[in-house]
Amino acid sequence: MRIALLLTVAFLLSCLALFVTNQKAWAETSNSALWCPNLFLDTVQAGNTVELGALYISEKNAGSIKENDWVTISLPSWVKLKSIRIYFPPTYLPYSVSGATYKAEFDENGFTVNREVYSYGDWAGLGPDMLLQAVSPSSFTLKVNKNWIPTKTCFKATIYFDQVLLQPQAAEEFKPLDIKATLDAPSRSGFSSGSVTVAKLQLAARSSISADLPTQITESGGSLADITLKEDAPGALRVNGENFLTRDTVKLTLSPGFVWDQVKLIPQGGFGSDSVGYEVETDASGGSALYLKIGRSSADPGAPGEGKLPGQLVIKATVKVDKNLTEGCEVKVFYGGTNPGVGGERVAEVTVAKYLVPGLKVVARSKTTVVAGRRDQVLGSFAVLEGMPNDLPSGRSLHLTLPEGVKWNRLPEVFCEAGEANLTFLDRQNEGRTLVYRIENTGADRLSLCFEGATVDLAVYAPAEIKVTVKCSRLSGNASVAQVRSPVTLAAAGGDIRIGLPDQPVGEVTVKENFPGALRARDASGDRAYLELELPPGLRFAQLPTVQVTSGDLELYQAGIQLADGDRTLVIPIERSSVAGVAEGKGDKKEKVGGTLIVRNILLTSDRTVPEGPVDLEIKGTALSETMELFADRQNRLQLVIARCLTPAPREVKVRAVFTVGSSKYLVGDREEVMDVVPYIKDGRVYAPVRYLARAVGLKDSDILWDEAAGTVTLLTPRRVVLFRVGEKSYTVQGVEVSRDAAPEIVNGRTMLPYRFLAQALGFGAEWDEIHRQVLIQ
């Protein structure tokens, strides 16, 4: 029983909700404007009455408007009603007002309906079924005065604001605004509340121009598209009389290179046959200008339409070409002048013709971003346009050529954007960089061919942008259709080296992926891909550098990192490509980049053939490129300056210092110096004191730092810092550890070291003279 009761209550509540919902949807009208005119402050200020647009009220569902329903219609307080008409369109029974029109006139004291005078606040009858009450000169109320029998016919009413007087703010304070009729009805009324724009108030009436579709002209000139000049309101263009070339001007100026030839004016609307004349002159800008003489205003009572129609003028004209134009261009007309109805020296422009010259134009329709070293990259679309009809005649060949480092993969689809022609593919030439087509079945109209959907293969060393060059006989053109993105960004900390010296440190090298997956883990055959860093001839790696991924999820095959090609090439196998990437950038411009690997502890050994100048490291390998078999080797490698060689290979070597085993005397140039220990031979190596060796090559005592607690000697030179540790068979140069087979030792309070180790660490050469048992520092 309880369940049944609950079900009954739920059913009643749902019915009530449905009833309320239906009532809300049932009881409403649609309020709109039949038209919305533009009004202008300059005519309002004259105290003239104006006409607003018409307000249309339509019942959406028949029978929703009932007895005593009402709606108040208000205009802004600065809009004063003078005369309105209320029209009830024919809707048949039961509305007695159906098909009737009632006129109401307003003044300061009250209003009049069909010659009956009423005071503000009185109700006037509109037939037996409707009442009208004027509350003020800006507001009135419509009320239903009879309980209509429900019917399928909807109530409709149109309110014409025939005459109103506008009193807006002063002109210097004026801003353009909408004049709205506001409808206010009780919530239970069948009328809907809201607002409808019935006019737009502007500062002043203006004029404008438009043109038909542009024509085509050549060096001999030709006809322009028809130009139409329109006033916004009668009298917008002020009469400028005999001084129309200098005062209150109305002019249409042509693009440079063109002059007005024959002109015909066709007056329409408020312009009569004697309203407008013209003259062609050169204006202050040097352009050919068509000046219009406004002889009679369209607001003149004697004008066509008795001053109530805005003027309109159709201009038909031809032009001549007064310059040797070598390229096609658009011919424009610039509209302007000092006449108040124009609004400024140059207020509008329209394209009236296209000037054609023989030739070929290539235009990019879209532009893509492609990746260097990748296959099957989508190219942007482009169009090939004739300068003039038949510039691409039937039977001729059309060549589409890509730059060095780029080859066609998938052929583009071709279709005609304009004109008629068939293209037959003939051949690939120039090692795949050029496509050859034959043009057939061309028509009489100017031809425009669109090429889209093509893909290309790129070398790693591809240009920064891809331009397609199109040639047909002697005609050619090009367009940029893609930007090329390098898979990696390279950076080097740099350094200086000298010829003929081993173990010379240079700064670290950074390889940064520009997007996740830029360095591939597998090549086309499925084998592990690798990155190669190759030194130029005459240089080699003195030891295996350290390679480490410092950001991203790129993984290296560390066990496979090795030196090859006589230690000239560092081989870095890729275990796994990066996937996730790292977000970089600011704000909305952030994008994901891939991993970053850094090569550190780089020591270079140079022979005497290395030239003076920059030292280029070449980066290549299957991890970087999947197009190695498609392009020459030089096109599939990137270059990075990692050091600078300071001295060229000398023809003779100048001796700087000489140390003699067993002697405390040594030579620096031609000067003899004395030291407190003597060089000696141990295990086949000549040991000499560190301090005196350093002095001999130019270091001061302040550049030689001895740390007794740590047992280290640090030597400071302008280009490098060298640290030796007593008892250890290695030393560091610029933080890079260099292994050796002998260690420094202390003898009689002096740190002794094999002379060759020290000379090389400081960047000098060293030779042993067996006959004289001397060490020569070069």
Image (cartoon, rainbow, N blue to C red):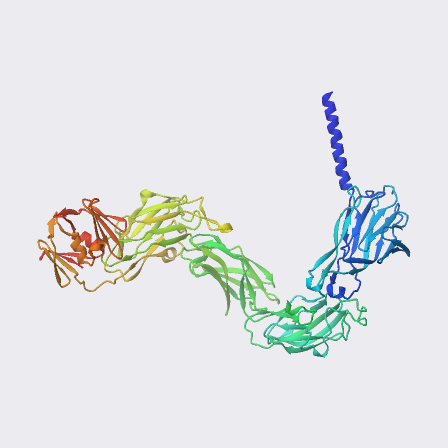
- The answer to which of 473 and 119 lies nearer the viewer is 119
Q: Quadrant of the C terminus?
A: bottom left
Res 351 visible: no
Q: In this view, does 721 lie above or below 46?
A: above
- The answer to which of 11 and 211 lies nearer the viewer is 11
Q: Quadrant of the N terminus?
A: top right
Going by the picture, which residue comes out furthest to the top? Answer: 1
Left or right: 514 as drawn, with respect to 110? left
Left or right: 159 as drawn, with respect to 385? right
Q: Residue at x 74, y 62 (%)?
A: 39
Res 703 visible: yes
Q: Position of residue 734 (x, y in %)?
A: 27, 51
Q: How many marks?
A: 0
Q: Where is residue 435 in the image (x, y as percent from the top left)?
A: 48, 60
Left or right: 120 as drawn, with respect to 329? right
Picture quadrant of residue 383: bottom right
Q: In this view, does 137 lie above or below 59?
A: below
Going by the picture, which residue comes out furthest to the front? Answer: 109
Q: Position of residue 746 (x, y in %)?
A: 15, 47
Picture quadrant of residue 552: top left
- The answer to which of 114 and 435 lies nearer the viewer is 114
Q: Where is residue 126 in the image (x, y as percent from the top left)?
A: 88, 51
Left or right: 232 as drawn, with respect to 133? left
